[in-house]
């Protein structure tokens, strides 16, 4: 059993060591051009050369939840692409989103600005009933986020490609359900997978359907958002602001207007980081299941894009 690791801009050595300890029966190494073909690979944004050389792979394990970068490569039709189910990311995402929603709802940015000038201020409490939160994308991460928001008594809407039924969450689905979902939402949380159908889905048309004073939280992919449209809608007063963790270009260029916009909060793609030990445990379990001929969770459907 040979396992190879190929990461873009991430050091593979801690993963090699951790995987070797967790799976001593296997031979684990970092990929280099010309290396022998392995049985399985663990990757993050590998080059096309890696795919071309590793033609005998049985499975390709992606260390992030999103697989859009992988699906842009020319992959052999028989190659099984597997994404992580969770590995500690969903609780991080729930923390991040709840923090962003509460920070906006409680107007903590305004209080921060006042305290910087020594002002003791008061703001009238807002009604949670007026702040319905809509979660776009009800996969593992989206479902965890939606459930976490319920704890704070926000009305929660959910949107997904196919119909879902989650207790206490008003669910919408499909192209026909999107306008109603948007109209019922004041705070929009994007956790959609990036596919050709969802690229640029956060645009002038969709975002203008949010309730007036709407707020956008994007923690999925930068290419979901038409950046100029967001700024236009904030400056016009239809949207009150945004918290953005993902961008079309990362790192976000120093000259980008998001850095300087007073109603946009920027974080450096840190909403949910891959936890190495949890990920290794999950990947080893899946490889062992495949060896036993068992089905595993997280196998990507290339046609759907997730």
Image (spheres, rainbow, N blue to C red):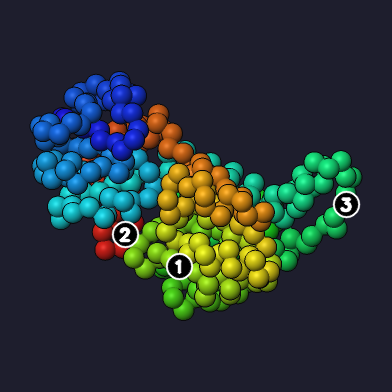
Q: CA distance from mark 1 to mark 3?
A: 37 Å
Label 3 packing within 10 angstroms: few (<14), some (14-19), many (20+): few
**Quadrant of residue 1 in the image?**
top left
Q: CA distance from mark 2 to mark 3?
A: 47 Å
**Which type of secondary structure does the marked residue at label 2 adopt?**
loop
Q: Residue at x 46, y 39 (%)?
A: 273
**Which type of secondary structure does the marked residue at label 1 adopt?**
loop
Q: Residue at x 56, y 64 (%)?
A: 230
Looking at the image, is 117 positioned above or below residue 3? Answer: below
| Quarter placement of the C terminus | bottom left
Closer to the N terminus: mark 1 or mark 3?
Answer: 3
Label 1 packing within 10 angstroms: few (<14), some (14-19), many (20+): some
On the image, numbered disc 3 is attached to which residue? Answer: 122
Q: Residue at x 64, y 59 (%)?
A: 241
User: Quick one: 202 or 287, which is closer to the camera?
Assistant: 202
**Which type of secondary structure does the marked residue at label 3 adopt?**
loop
Closer to the N terminus: mark 2 or mark 3?
Answer: 3
Closer to the N terminus: mark 1 or mark 2?
Answer: 1
On the image, numbered disc 1 is attached to which residue? Answer: 201
Residue 139 seen in this snapshot: no
Q: CA distance from mark 1 to mark 2?
A: 15 Å
Looking at the image, is 63 positioned above or below residue 127? Answer: above
Q: Residue at x 50, y 62 (%)?
A: 227
Label 2 packing within 10 angstroms: few (<14), some (14-19), many (20+): some
Looking at the image, is 37 positioned above or below residue 82? Answer: above
Residue 296 numbered tag? none
On the image, numbered disc 2 is attached to which residue? Answer: 305
Asked if disc 1 and disc 2 are in contact, CB closer than 8 Å, the reply is no
Asked if disc 1 and disc 3 are in contact, CB closer than 8 Å, the reply is no
Q: Position of residue 250 (x, y in %)?
A: 43, 46
Q: Position of residue 100 (x, y in %)?
A: 63, 50
């Amino acid at each position: 059993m040979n396992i190879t690791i190929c990461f873009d801009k991430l050091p593979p050595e801690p993963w090699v060591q951790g995987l070797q300890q967790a799976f001593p029966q296997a031979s684990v190494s970092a990929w280099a051009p010309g290396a022998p073909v392995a049985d399985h690979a663990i990757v993050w944004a590998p080059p096309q050369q890696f795919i071309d050389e590793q033609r005998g792979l049985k499975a390709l394990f992606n260390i992030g939840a999103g697989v859009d970068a992988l699906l842009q490569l020319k992959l052999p039709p028989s190659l099984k692409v597997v994404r992580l189910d969770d590995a500690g990311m969903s609780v991080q995402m729930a923390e991040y989103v709840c923090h962003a929603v509460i920070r906006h709802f409680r107007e903590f940015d305004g209080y921060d600005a006042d305290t910087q000038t020594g002002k003791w201020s008061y703001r009238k409490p807002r009604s949670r009933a007026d702040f319905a939160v809509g979660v776009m994308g009800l996969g593992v991460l989206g479902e965890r986020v939606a459930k976490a928001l319920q704890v704070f008594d926000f009305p929660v809407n959910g949107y997904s490609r196919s119909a879902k039924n989650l207790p206490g969450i008003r669910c919408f689905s499909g192209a026909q359900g999107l306008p109603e979902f948007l109209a019922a939402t004041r705070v929009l949380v994007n956790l959609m997978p990036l596919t050709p159908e969802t690229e640029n889905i956060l645009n002038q048309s969709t975002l203008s359907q949010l309730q007036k004073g709407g707020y956008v939280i994007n923690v999925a992919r930068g290419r979901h958002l038409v950046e100029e449209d967001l700024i236009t809608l904030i400056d016009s007063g239809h949207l009150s602001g945004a918290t953005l963790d993902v961008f079309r270009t990362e790192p976000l260029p120093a000259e980008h207007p998001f850095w300087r916009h007073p109603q946009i909060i920027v974080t450096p793609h840190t909403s949910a980081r891959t936890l190495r030990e949890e990920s290794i445990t999950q990947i080893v379990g899946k490889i062992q299941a495949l060896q036993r001929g068992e089905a595993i969770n997280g196998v990507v459907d290339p046609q759907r894009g997730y």
